[in-house]
Amino acid sequence: MTAPAGAPVLGLTGIDTFYGRAQILSGVSLEVRRGEVVALLGRNGAGKSTTIKSIIGLVRPAGGEISFEGNAIQGLEPFQISRLGLGYVPEDRRIFTGLTVAENLEVGRQPRRANAPEWNHEKLFALFPNLAAMTGRLGGLMSGGEQQMLTIARTLMGNPTTILLDEPSEGLAPVIVEQVAKTILDLKAQGLSILLSEQNLHLSTLVSDRAYIIEKGSIRYEGPMADLAENEEVRGAYLMV
């Protein structure tokens, strides 16, 4: 898969992030170009989720710069970043278990953006046919795979230009992981830019244009996904358990 020619829509430069006195990220720099899927790979605890949370504002970086659509966003609140068109699909899904599928979708609704595809219930149900059959079902009565699809659909209701996907394959059966891969490729075809935080190398290889590997809070590798798929030495050093 060849990386598309596009301008950077999301950029991190020298990000340092701490939890208390413990430094989790050290000088993390990466970029996502318009219309591409970028994988952020690494073992459990390497710093992937902290990178995603630093971008969306759930964790405040102590140093460095984060830009989105030409705006400096470090220091903004998560809701302010979301309103700029940056969507976030959390690792733990965080659906509202006491609300129905339709009600969960409405929670995510934001106004249409000129530079992003517009999403509504009809388009989302075409993308996620299983959800169309359970609009009245409570979130707490859905399977893990169904909840993951609902979480992605709820994020799309915000009409984002770019999406942060944090470990979307976590805990899912292989057949559901393949559905997630298809969904990511469908979203890319719609023109969305995606930063995918993952441990699943198979999923990342299926959907990603480029890859970064993070280890102990620092970027150790950057390159086309196709090159990483052929580089057994790098995979063995940073991705194998």
Image (tube, helix red, strand yellow):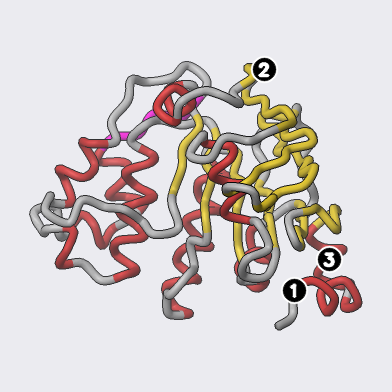
Main SS type for the magenta part? Answer: loop
Give the residue pinned by disc 3.
228
Circle 3 packing at 10 Å, graded few (<14), some (14-19), many (20+), is: many
Query: Depth-wise, is mark 1 or mark 3 nearer the camera?
Result: 1
Coordinates of residue 19 in the picture (x, y in percent)? 58, 49
User: Where in the figure is residue 93, as x and y percent of width and height?
Assistant: 36, 56
As shown in the figure, which amino acid type bears the numbered disc 2?
Gly
The residue where tag 2 is placed is: 70
> Is label 3 in contact with label 2 (beta carbons under 8 Å)?
no
| Magenta span includes 118 | yes
Q: Are marks 1 and 2 in contact (CB under 8 Å)?
A: no
Say above or below: 111 vs 182.
Answer: above
Q: Which mark is residue 33?
A: none
Residue drawn at point x = 29 percent, y = 64 percent: 146
Is 77 covered by the magenta stretch?
A: no
Residue 95 vs 216, above or below: the answer is: above
Residue at 11%, 54% (x, y): give it.
Answer: 98
Q: Which residue is mark 1?
A: 239
- CA distance for labels 1 and 2: 32 Å
Spatial CA span between label 1 and label 3: 11 Å
* Start-end of magenta stretch: 116-120
Question: Which amino acid type corresponds to the residue marked 1 in the rendered image?
Answer: Leu
